[in-house]
Structures are given as C-alpha cells and as structure tokens.
Amino acid sequence: MNIKIPIYTLLFSLVAAPACSKRVLVPPRLDLQPYPAVGLVTFTMENAKGDLDQMATDQFLAELHNAQPGTPVVELGDYEALLQQCGREKLDREALRTIAAEYGVATVFVGHMKASNISPRASISQFPRVGATVSVQLTVRMLETEVGATLWTNTARAKESVGDLGLSGSQIIFSAQDPKEAYGDLVRHLIAEVTTDMYATWR
C-alpha cells in the first residue's frame, strides 16, 4: 500500500529518517517544481451534461496543491472559449504557443471525462429521471507549450450508484440539488486515482 506524501515534506523526511529504516521515500513521478507556472483548462465531458466536469477540475486543482503546495497554476477556463481566443480549432502546437505567450505557462493540463454504461435501478418507464449506476472515465494530460509534446498522462475509471440521473437523447444528465453530495464520491475517486503520480510515496 502506497502512502501519498506532499512533496514539501520530502527533503525533511529524507534527512530525518533513521538510517536503519527499510522503507524509502520515493519522489513523485510528476514533479512540477521545474516549471515556473502551469496552466489548467476546465475539463471537457462527453456523453453527459451537468457540472461534473467543473467539479472534477476544481478537485484536481485542490489535489495538485495538496500534493505539491506552492505550485503556480493559471486557470485558463473553458476549452472551447480558449481555442476561440487562440484562433484555432484544436489544441495544437500553435494554440499552445499562443497560450504560453499570453499566460506565461510552460505546460498545460487538459482533462476529458466520458460517461457510459448506464444501469438503471428502476424500470425503463421511469426515465428520463431515475437512480442508476454509471461509469465515468477521466483522462488527464500535461502538454508542453513549446512543441506541444505530451509530458504526462493518466487515466482513472469509476463506477458509482448515483441519484437524480437523467437522459437527454444519448446523453446522461448529472443533476441534483447538491451535486457535491450526489456525485462527490465519484469525482473524488477519479481525481485521487489520476493524481497519484503527483505525490511522493513511502515504499
């Protein structure tokens, strides 16, 4: 079992650890310290509507700062709006260079969520709004802004029973009076999995 450790404790722990200890503190696979600033684009969502993407983006930012405190993060906002601002149709090298020049970021995090596999907990006749089990996959990439290379990527999947779930054509609607309570466990699971590489770990 790996125990995640924020990076700022790494140096102190290495100095203070007893020489006879069999466990070692392994640095994070994704160390953000070399970058003066990183960008974060609001995650996108496929086959679904609602604010699950924004919740995941906010949770990702919180987890990043918990893992590596003090990391400067520039929130770049909506994906499509950002592309329009850059005058591009996709997040290619030219778009990334424009973002770097405008916001002074060396790398950009982008995330994409995809919902699928609805298993209703009631008869089909009770749609379009019913409790159900749904699968969500989240993929996050870190892109370098000079040449557009992918520096890091990770994918997490979660399957949860959720309430107040609706359908609109082929799309799932995540809607609830309190989304954090309704879908909080789903989002926390996805983000905890996808940000594992940002933590130092005892092994």
Image: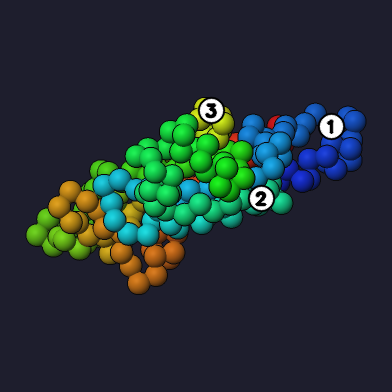
Classify mark 3: residues with Cα within 10 Å, few (<14), some (14-19) or many (20+): few
Residue 160, percent from left and from top? 36, 51
Which badge, 1 or 2, comes first in the chain's sequence?
1
Q: Residue 162's image quarter?
A: bottom left
Q: Marks 1 and 2, how far apart in space?
A: 34 Å
Which residue is at 32% across, 59% downward?
50
Task: Name the kind of residue labelled 3 in the image.
Answer: Val
Task: Name the kind of residue labelled 1 in the image.
Answer: Ser
Which residue is at 77% across, 46% downward?
8
Residue 195, percent from left and from top? 56, 42
Q: Residue 26's image quarter?
A: top right
Q: Element type at marker 3? A: loop
Q: Element type at marker 1? A: loop
Query: In this rendering, is residue 98 above or below 175?
Result: above
Residue to which mark 2 is pinned = 72
Q: Residue 163's image quarter?
A: bottom left
The answer to whether residue 122 is left or right of residue 60 is: left
Camera-side mark, 1 or 2: 2
Q: Nearer the viewer, residue 165 or 37?
A: 37
Residue to which mark 3 is pinned = 147
Task: Name the kind of residue labelled 2 in the image.
Answer: Pro
Classify mark 1: residues with Cα within 10 Å, few (<14), some (14-19) or many (20+): few
Which badge, 3 or 1, comes first in the chain's sequence?
1
